[in-house]
Structures are given as structure tokens and as C-alpha cells.
Image (cartoon, helix red, strand yellow):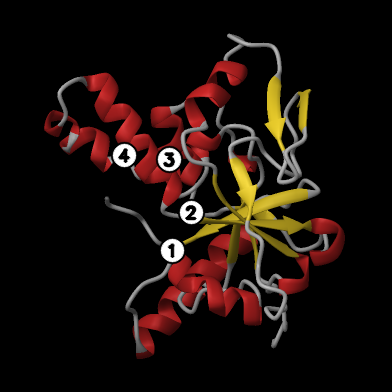
């Protein structure tokens, strides 16, 4: 699966030049007030670092990036860019429907989903992502706007974060709600209780909160 990261192997003068260019792009981008809950996707290899230090600005761009919406999971960055499996691997399955189901599970399950609470992290300093991921996302999905992808220079403290993972085999059912085929979602809680309702921005249907061990604490070493 191909992904497009906003980090690189730039070093020395090239790194400084890249960071300077990012700073100029950022300064020219439109300011925006984020939603209460915004989302940062990363790979599990970064989990320990984020738990300890929070989400830090990239070395080559000096920015922290986030998704300013979560209702449409297909357009979350970088999931929306992870389309190579659809383009190149679909013929490995007996039917196109089977391929889409398997590859959907793959692209949604490889990430950690970090929920950022703006009431804690702050609403200040955000601008529309100057690297314009919405232009790429709009190739695949309608209704994508520049304001769906945002960033700021300040780090995101770990105290503002909650960790979620993809709930296996939930995306097809959720899409039925998203595209009006069903009118409500059935939520099953950890204690076995069941509730019916609409979309929950604090705890999206297709995600489940990761229950961290009691000894793991957000240390926020910034």
C-alpha cells in the first residue's frame, strides 16, 4: 500500500530550505477554527512516541496536521490517498466485491486514530493545510473541502489525545447510514449495552477506543 507522508529524508541545508518553504506556504494559507474534535492518523510504530510526547511538528515542515472532519472516513488523510490497492491488487480476488471488502479492511485498519480535543489542545493557530490535500481527495470523493484538512505550528499535547482503532468489518454498515440506506446506527458498548442513534463525533461508529493499560500514562514530555 502506497502512502504519502508529510515527512521526508531532507537533511542539512535541504531540510532548512524545505522547512522555510513550508513556513511561507503556511503563512499564506487561510486561518480556520477547528471543530471540537479533530483527528490525526498515524501508524502504530509512532504510538509510544505520541503517548509520551504528543503530536510534534514534522522535522521538514514544522507543522502538525489533522483532519477537521471524521464523518466521511473515506476522505480522511492519508486514507484517501491509499488507493493503490484498488488500482493494482483487485485482480488477486475472485470478485470485485470481495476485493473491495478485503482492501477496505486493510486500508482502515493499518492506522492509529488520535482524537484531539480542541478544548484542551486549544483552538488557536490553525490554518488550512497549505499542501492542498483536498485537491487529491476530491479526485475520489465529492463534497471534500479545503477546511477538512488543517494544521498548526504548535505541538498537540498528549493530554488532549484519545486513541482509537478501526472497528473490524464496520465500514459497509456505516456507509449504509452515511448514504441514507439506513436511518440510524446501532452502538454496542464495552459493557454489552446497546443504543441506537445518529453519528457521534466524539466516538465515531467505525472506531473503537483503545483501552490502554493502567500503567500507561500520557507524560507530555515537550
- Looking at the rendered image, the disc whose residue lies closer to the viewer, 2 or 3, is 3
Q: Which residue is mark 4?
A: 83
Q: Are marks 2 and 4 in contact (CB under 8 Å)?
A: no
* Apparent side of residue 101 relative to residue 124 in the rendered image (left or right): left
Could you tell me how far apart the alpha carbons at marks 1 and 3 are, in whole angstroms?
A: 14 Å
Residue 131 has which mark? Answer: 2
Could you tell me how far apart the alpha carbons at marks 4 and 3 are, in whole angstroms?
A: 7 Å
The residue positioned farthest toward the bottom in the image shown: 12
Could you tell me how far apart the alpha carbons at marks 1 and 4 are, in whole angstroms?
A: 17 Å
Q: Is residue 57 above or below residue 172?
A: below
Residue 6 has which mark? Answer: 1
Q: Is residue 3 above or below residue 148?
A: below
* Apparent side of residue 60 relative to residue 11 in the rendered image (left or right): right
Could you tell me how far apart the alpha carbons at marks 2 and 3 are, in whole angstroms?
A: 15 Å
First along the sequence among labels 2 and 4: 4
Q: Residue at x 45, y 31 (%)?
A: 138
Q: Which residue is mark 3?
A: 80
Q: Are marks 4 and 3 in contact (CB under 8 Å)?
A: yes
* Apparent side of residue 158 relative to residue 120 in the rendered image (left or right): left
| Percent position of residue 37, x then y | 75, 49
Q: Are marks 1 and 2 in contact (CB under 8 Å)?
A: yes
| Percent position of residue 96, x then y | 23, 21
Helix, strand or loop for disc 2? loop
Amino acid at each position: 500500500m502506497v502512502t504519502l507522508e508529510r515527512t521526508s529524508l531532507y537533511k542539512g541545508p535541504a531540510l532548512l530550505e524545505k522547512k522555510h518553504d513550508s513556513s511561507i506556504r503556511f503563512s499564506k494559507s487561510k486561518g480556520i477554527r477547528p471543530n471540537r474534535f479533530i483527528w490525526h492518523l498515524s501508524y502504530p510504530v509512532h504510538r509510544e512516541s505520541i503517548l509520551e510526547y504528543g503530536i510534534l511538528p514534522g522535522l521538514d515542515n514544522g507543522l502538525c496536521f489533522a483532519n477537521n472532519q471524521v464523518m466521511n472516513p473515506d476522505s480522511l488523510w492519508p486514507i484517501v490517498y491509499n488507493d493503490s490497492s484498488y488500482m493494482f491488487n483487485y485482480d488477486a480476488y475472485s470478485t470485485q466485491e470481495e476485493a473491495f471488502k478485503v482492501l477496505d479492511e486493510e486500508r482502515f485498519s493499518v492506522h492509529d486514530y488520535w482524537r484531539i480535543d480542541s478544548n484542551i489542545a486549544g483552538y488557536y493557530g490553525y490554518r488550512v493545510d497549505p499542501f492542498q490535500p483536498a485537491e487529491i481527495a476530491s479526485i475520489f470523493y465529492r463534497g471534500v473541502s479545503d477546511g477538512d484538512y488543517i494544521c498548526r505550528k504548535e505541538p498537540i499535547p498528549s493530554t488532549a489525545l484519545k486513541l482509537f482503532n478501526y472497528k473490524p468489518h464496520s465500514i459497509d454498515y456505516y456507509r449504509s447510514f452515511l448514504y441514507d440506506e439506513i436511518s440510524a446506527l446501532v452502538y454496542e458498548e464495552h459493557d454489552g449495552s446497546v443504543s441506537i442513534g445518529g453519528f457521534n463525533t466524539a466516538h465515531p461508529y467505525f472506531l473503537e477506543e483503545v483501552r490502554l493499560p493502567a500503567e500507561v500514562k500520557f507524560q507530555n514530555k515537550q
